[in-house]
Amino acid sequence: MSRFEESAPARGGFSYDLCKRNEMLMQKGLKPSSYLKTGTTIVGLVFQDGVILGADTRATEGPIVADKNCEKIHYMAPNIYCCGAGTAADTEAVTDMVSSQLKLHRFHTGRESRVVTALTLLKSHLFSYQGHVSAALVLGGVDVTGPHLHTIYPHGSTDTLPFATMGSGSLAAMAIFESKYREGLTRDEGVKLVAEAICSGIFNDLGSGSNVDVCVITKGKREYLRNYMLPNPRTYVSEKGYSFSKKTEVLLTKITPLRELVEVIEGGDAMEE
Amino acid sequence: MDSIYNDLNAPHSMGTTIIGVTYDGGVVLGADSRTSTGMYVANRASDKITQLTDNVYICRSGSAADSQVLSDYVRYYLHQHTIQLGQPATVKVAANLVRMVSYNNKNMLQTGLIVGGWDKYEGGKIYGIPLGGTLLEQPFTIGGSGSSYLYGFFDQVWKEGMTQDEAEKLVVKAVSLAIARDGASGGVVRTVTINKDGVSRKFYPGNTLPLWHEELEAKDSLLDSLSATSPEPMVS
């Protein structure tokens, strides 16, 4: 009968039972786990008029969801977009960098950017960092030579495929693609398949979640469908809303325009040595 | 469970079976098409036989990134060399360039390669460049993880002066044998035949390959077996 107390349910609040043990372990040299972002499902497929890219919108910091609605489909050029999985900072930085390089290249050549250009720039950068820039990308676009879809791995290897998936949810999404993909899909069929593959990642992979973003790129046109599907709405919202304590009182409302730091003088003499 | 996640971040490597064989009048290069990241097949239809020049091709194995970048560099050097020389590059020059890059960066690269092609001076030639950067001119050579299963096979079946048809059949048979036994090889068989008339690429889908000891026939869908006559329900 006295055994009853041991199996009683734990009371609420933080349990400090393990704090001393953690301290002891840290002193002995155990390093605390580092925050990695590996959760994502990103996909791409080639359809009859171009390419369709898709991504989920969950950004994680270890077990915590840091951003419930982040953007994983990055702009590279008006006709080229890139989905990124891996460390968020790395994917953001590498796609921004190559996007700027492509813009400069467009100024130099006077032509629309080609997908293979973006591919080579990304691949050489990632290879030179020997896999330490943890960015796994799905690059897709339509240029004068036609529609292209490539995957780029953190070590710098690339594959050219008709359909591709990356990220922790890639196995779930690939299962959908392998059973349902065929050549010559129409736009609506393609978007539906991409959304289905991302949903498969969202519901079956712990690292992916929230909403579905889709981007359709065709010759001369691109449609960025942000939050194309919202399969995880917030089911309960309290009607009371948020209330602030009565002690917060507005003292004064004043809008001060910032002074212009630069005075523009009309005319004036040209500078002389 | 965790080991699967770790593997998805593993470097992209090509388990691979690659083969290069000379015949009377040219060479035949063959490869499987599986690229794996740990235990996951990242690309089941990759092309491991890449072009260096019009008449020289290279089979890649080992680290996908290393072999792709190495091929890109050698293609660039060969392009410059062709402009400077005023003639198509020879297979020997191509193989030597691959060997120079591979040997001088041996600490950082992990890739085994086979260079094959045809030129008007020496005809069809095959050069093997394994890990470390040795250069070996051979009448035939095999590479990749699946090659372990083919040494005995080639010792028995190889003969000099085969016809193009015999050589192609030999290569396809060999790659399919390796695919049957090596987990890191699979997918389709690709061959590239190079002779004085040019280059011809062939593709053999997995279901057209011969079946070996205890291999089962490939099924398109598990549902097919349901439509076959189902056994009678047991009645007590």
Image (tube, grey):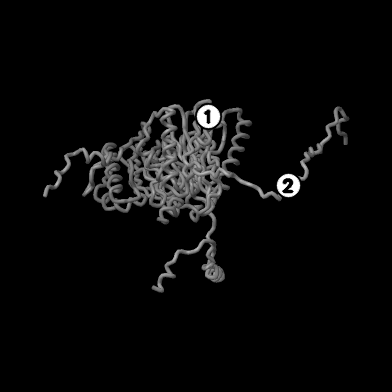
Q: Which residue is mark 2?
A: A249
Q: Secondary structure at mark 2?
A: loop
Q: Is residue A224 visible?
A: yes
- Towards the viewer: B141 or B204: B204
- Left or right: residue A4 compared with residue A13: left
Q: Residues within 10 Å of mark 2 (few under 14, many from 20)?
A: few
Q: Where residue B189 appears, x then y in whole percent? A: 32, 41
Residue found at the very far left of the displayed protein: B236
CA gap, disc 2 to disc 1?
49 Å
Q: Is residue B115 visible in this depiction of the protein? A: no
Residue hosting label 1:
A222
Camera-side residue of B25 and A118:
A118
- The quadrant of the image that shows the N terminus of chain A is bottom left
Residue at (44% x, 66% y) in the render: A8
Q: Which quarter of the figure is the C terminus of chain A placed in? A: top right
Residue at 52%, 65% in the rendered image = A15
Q: Nearer the viewer, residue A86 or B156?
A: A86
- Label disc, if present, on residue A23 of the rendered structure: none
Tell me where residue B127 appears, x and y as whole percent: 39, 46
Label 2 marks a residue whose chain is A
- Where's residue B131, x and y in %? 43, 53
Q: Earlier in the sequence, mark 2 or mark 1?
A: 1
x%, y% of residue A82?
Answer: 52, 38
